[in-house]
């Protein structure tokens, strides 16, 4: 058992979880489990018990941890001791890890566990000495400088170095957007130093004063070449504007991502073999050509990514045009009667071809399957063995189409006006299209996320995507037709019932919400008993007509 395996066991015991221990050790969980299993096979004991809540030490595991913990601690102390006391006799090894520092940390720990105290491991940050020296030189002679960086973090790091150097400067980035106008106004003056990200600096229009022009104009310094030549040219174009003097200079390292990933390995070997000193400035046409070729590679890769993206989008766009054309017809109020009849014929053809064949006798046809899939959509009479006996597939197809069309005409006759059914067709069709299209969009996105795996089978993902998308689109169209026909064939027309008044309004059920009651006005003049009788007899009303009314 090695010291490295011992450290793995101690880390798992400390974390109580295989997953957390693997993360701390910068290993995969499977690799860590394999290392622990190898130790258990070698010793013939079970070190950890694995449960849903994590891992726990067994009795043998606790004894093992008690024995190996002092050994690992002692080895680390010895490594630190020799690295401090024997500096004169040890070799030097520089490890640079700009993007993934944990890789270097893991390498250091590995060297310590291998008991190699004569190897010194140190971390080296990106040296900006050449940039600082160039800025100081330009600042001393009064030439304004604009330093372009690739990130806000790098601009702030460069700012700290300039502060140590005692050079006054301004920082232009996303954090200083409120002072952008003020900073740009001061950038063209004598001895001004401005640090800006490429995004912030490439859009500035710096005006020079007379002293700055006499000192050589604006000096552009790039701390790193961008992967896009357009970005570099935009930054380079800040100098020499409208006849003003100026120059630009870019500083790169062979360890930059651009050179490390896309640079020429032959170029790297040449400079390594020549024994070029660290931080030494190199100006050579070969280096410039290598940078341009690296940028061309990146731009070509980006173009391929965008082209691949457009190929996928083109498939979606073609399907979108078909669906939106159909929706536009519905929204414009066009007559969809012919389209519905075509749906009926297509549906009948689909299921007849699926269930029936002329190569097989009609007695062997699966009529139950056919009736089970078609009759829920179009309520025709179910086929029986007697009805299909001695008939061909095309003959049955023709009969089914005629029956389906007749049923739809009968459904149309149920409506008082044909236009009511036309409006219903548009509403139902639009609802089915929208519902199925939204589901189809989600399915296409899922297909797109996983179609890249087809490349492992030596198949073009774009071609496979087009074929799968075509099949999915046809299934969606079929589903739209079936749902539309199912709803139209099973719709019912409700007759409006006219109701007559069967009860008079009384004091208990009349509506008092109409307003306040008005007094009843008599249409005839009231006749009192002693008034002359209206009949003209000359007698009093009570002795003439009034007496007759009482009788």
Image (cartoon, rainbow, N blue to C red):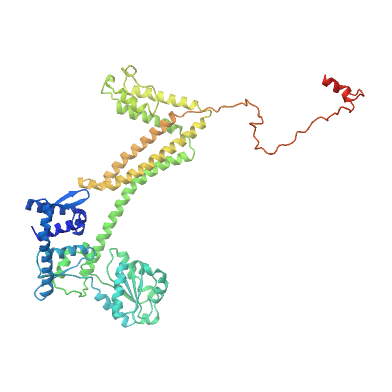
The answer to which of 446 and 63 lies nearer the viewer is 63
Looking at the picture, does residue 277 appear above or below residue 494?
below
Q: Residue at x 11, y 75 (%)?
A: 85
> Does 11 sit left or right of 313 as displayed?
left
Q: Position of residue 460 (x, y in %)?
A: 24, 46
Q: Is residue 442 visible?
A: yes
> Does 503 sit left or right of 296 as displayed?
right
Question: Residue 64's quadrant in the figure?
Answer: bottom left
> Does 535 sit left or right of 161 as displayed?
right
Q: Residue at x 33, y 43 (%)?
A: 443
The answer to which of 453 and 65 lies nearer the viewer is 65
The answer to which of 101 and 200 lies nearer the viewer is 101
Q: Position of residue 223 (x, y in %)?
A: 28, 71
Q: Position of residue 110 (x, y in %)?
A: 13, 63
Q: Residue at x 16, y 75 (%)?
A: 277
Q: Residue at x 9, y 51 (%)?
A: 45
Q: Position of residue 182 (x, y in %)?
A: 42, 74
Q: Is residue 248 visible?
A: no
Question: Residue 380's quadrant in the figure?
Answer: top left
Looking at the picture, does residue 91 appear above or below residue 166?
above
Give the total of numbered labels: 0
Question: Residue 362's quadrant in the figure?
Answer: top left
> Does 511 sit left or right of 317 as displayed?
right
Tell me the quarter of the image containing the C terminus: top right
Tell me the quarter of the image containing the N terminus: bottom left
Looking at the picture, does residue 99 appear above or below residue 382?
below
Looking at the picture, does residue 144 appear above or below residue 461?
below
């Amino acid at each position: 058992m090695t010291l490295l395996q011992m450290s793995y066991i101690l880390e798992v015991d400390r974390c109580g979880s295989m997953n957390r221990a693997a993360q701390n050790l910068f290993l995969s969980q499977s690799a860590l489990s394999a290392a622990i299993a190898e130790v258990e096979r070698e010793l013939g004991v079970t070190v950890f018990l694995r449960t849903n809540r994590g891992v726990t030490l067994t009795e043998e595991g606790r004894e093992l941890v008690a024995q190996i913990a002092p050994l690992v601690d002692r080895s680390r102390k010895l490594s630190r001791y020799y690295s401090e006391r024997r500096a004169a006799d040890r070799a030097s090894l520089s490890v640079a890890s700009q993007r993934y520092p944990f890789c270097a940390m893991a390498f250091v720990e590995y060297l310590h566990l291998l008991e190699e105290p004569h190897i010194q491991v140190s971390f080296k940050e990106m040296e900006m000495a050449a940039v600082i020296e160039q800025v100081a030189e330009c600042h001393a002679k009064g030439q304004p400088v604009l330093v372009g960086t690739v990130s806000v973090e790098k601009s702030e790091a460069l700012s700290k170095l300039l502060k140590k150097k005692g050079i006054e400067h301004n920082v232009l980035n996303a954090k200083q957007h409120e002072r952008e106008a003020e900073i740009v106004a001061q950038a063209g003056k004598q001895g001004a130093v401005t640090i800006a990200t490429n995004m912030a600096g490439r859009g500035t229009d710096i005006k020079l004063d007379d002293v700055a022009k006499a000192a050589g104009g604006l000096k552009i310094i790039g701390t790193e070449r961008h992967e896009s030549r357009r970005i570099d040219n935009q930054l380079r174009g800040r100098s020499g504007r409208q006849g003003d003097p100026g120059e630009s200079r870019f500083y790169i390292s062979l360890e930059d991502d651009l050179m490390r990933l896309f640079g020429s390995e032959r170029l790297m070997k040449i400079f390594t073999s020549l024994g070029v000193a660290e931080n030494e400035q190199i100006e050579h046409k070969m280096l410039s050509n290598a940078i341009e070729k690296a940028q061309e590679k990146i731009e070509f890769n980006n173009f391929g990514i965008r082209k691949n993206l457009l190929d996928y989008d083109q498939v979606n766009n073609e399907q979108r045009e078909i669906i939106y054309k159909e929706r536009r017809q519905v929204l414009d109020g066009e007559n969809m009667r012919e389209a519905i009849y075509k749906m009926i014929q297509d549906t009948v053809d689909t299921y007849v071809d699926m269930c029936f064949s002329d190569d097989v006798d009609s007695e062997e046809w699966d009529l139950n399957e056919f009736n089970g899939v078609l009759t829920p959509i179009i309520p025709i009479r179910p086929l029986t063995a007697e009805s299909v006996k001695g008939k061909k597939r095309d003959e049955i197809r023709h009969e089914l189409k005629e029956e389906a069309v007749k049923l739809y005409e009968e459904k149309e006759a149920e409506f008082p006006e044909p236009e009511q059914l036309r409006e219903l067709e548009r509403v139902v069709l639009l609802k089915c299209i929208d519902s199925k299209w939204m589901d189809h969009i989600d399915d296409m996105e899922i297909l797109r996320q996983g179609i890249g795996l087809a490349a492992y089978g030596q198949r073009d993902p774009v071609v496979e995507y087009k074929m799968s998308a075509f099949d999915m689109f046809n299934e969606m169209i079929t589903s739209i037709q079936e749902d539309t026909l199912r709803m139209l064939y099973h719709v019912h027309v409700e007759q409006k019932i006219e109701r007559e008044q069967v009860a008079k309004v009384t004091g208990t059920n009349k509506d008092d919400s109409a307003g306040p009651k008005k007094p009843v006005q008599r249409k005839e003049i009231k006749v009192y008993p002693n008034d002359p009788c209206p009949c003209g007899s000359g007698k009093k009303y009570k002795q003439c007509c009034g007496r007759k009314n009482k009788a």
